[in-house]
Amino acid sequence: MALKERIGTVVSDKMDKTVVVAVINRYPHPTYKKIVSKTTRYKAHDPENSCAMGDRVKIKETRPLSAHKRWAIEEILNKTIKNKEDKK
């Protein structure tokens, strides 16, 4: 069985070595054919704490690392530019 991969955006990085990644899945509604968006949030392992909020990342499926963590950061696709004035 191949490991699953997802691309999403980091929405929370407040935990140690863990980030929450939101993945948006778009699909047509079966009856009305309107494009519907569904957001799924995955907790992913980030061993170096290198991800920040807003980063676009690729996550891959892994063995269970905790009660809710079954994904790991594979690579960071786009880094968010941090602004010093935002922290004030």
Image (tube, helix red, strand yellow):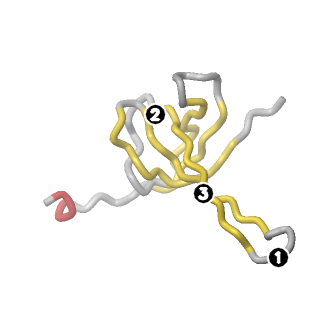
Say which residue appears at 76% left-offset and 65% top-offset.
Answer: 27
Query: Which residue is at the front of the view, 80 or 41?
Result: 41
Q: Are the two marked residues, 2 and 1, in contact with CB atoms closer than 8 angstroms?
A: no
* Mark 3 crowdedness (10 Å alpha carbons): few <14, some 14-19, many ≥20: few
* Vertical relation: 24 (above or below) 66: below
How crowded pointer 1 is (Cα within 10 Å; few <14, some 14-19, many 20+) is rated as few
| Left or right position of 3 against 1 | left
In-front residue for pair 74/53: 53
How many marks the image carries: the answer is 3
Is 12 displayed left or right of 87 in the figure? right
State which tag comes first along the sequence, 3 or 2.
3
Q: Is residue 31 above or below residue 43?
A: below
Mark 2 crowdedness (10 Å alpha carbons): few <14, some 14-19, many ≥20? many
Q: Which amino acid does label 1 sit on?
A: Lys
Q: In this view, does 79 lie above or below 46?
A: below
User: The residue tagged with tag 1: helix, strand or loop?
Assistant: loop
Q: Which mark is residue 33?
A: 1
**Could you say where residue 85 lies in the image, as x and y percent from the top left?**
17, 64
Q: Earlier in the sequence, mark 2 or mark 1?
A: 1
- Give the x, y percent position of residue 24: 62, 59
Amino acid type indicated by mark 3: Thr
Q: Which mark is residue 39?
A: 3
- Tell me which residue sits at (35%, 31%) in the image: 16
> For the point 44% across and 28% down, which residue is it?
47
Q: Which residue is drawn at 66% across and 33% down?
A: 61
Separation of residues labelled 2 and 1 (CA atoms): 38 Å
| Residue assigned mark 2 | 46
Q: Which of marks 3 and 1 is nearer the N terminus?
A: 1
The x and y percentages for residue 71 are 59, 34
Distance between the Cα atoms at labels 3 and 2? 21 Å
Question: Mark 2: which amino acid?
Answer: Asp
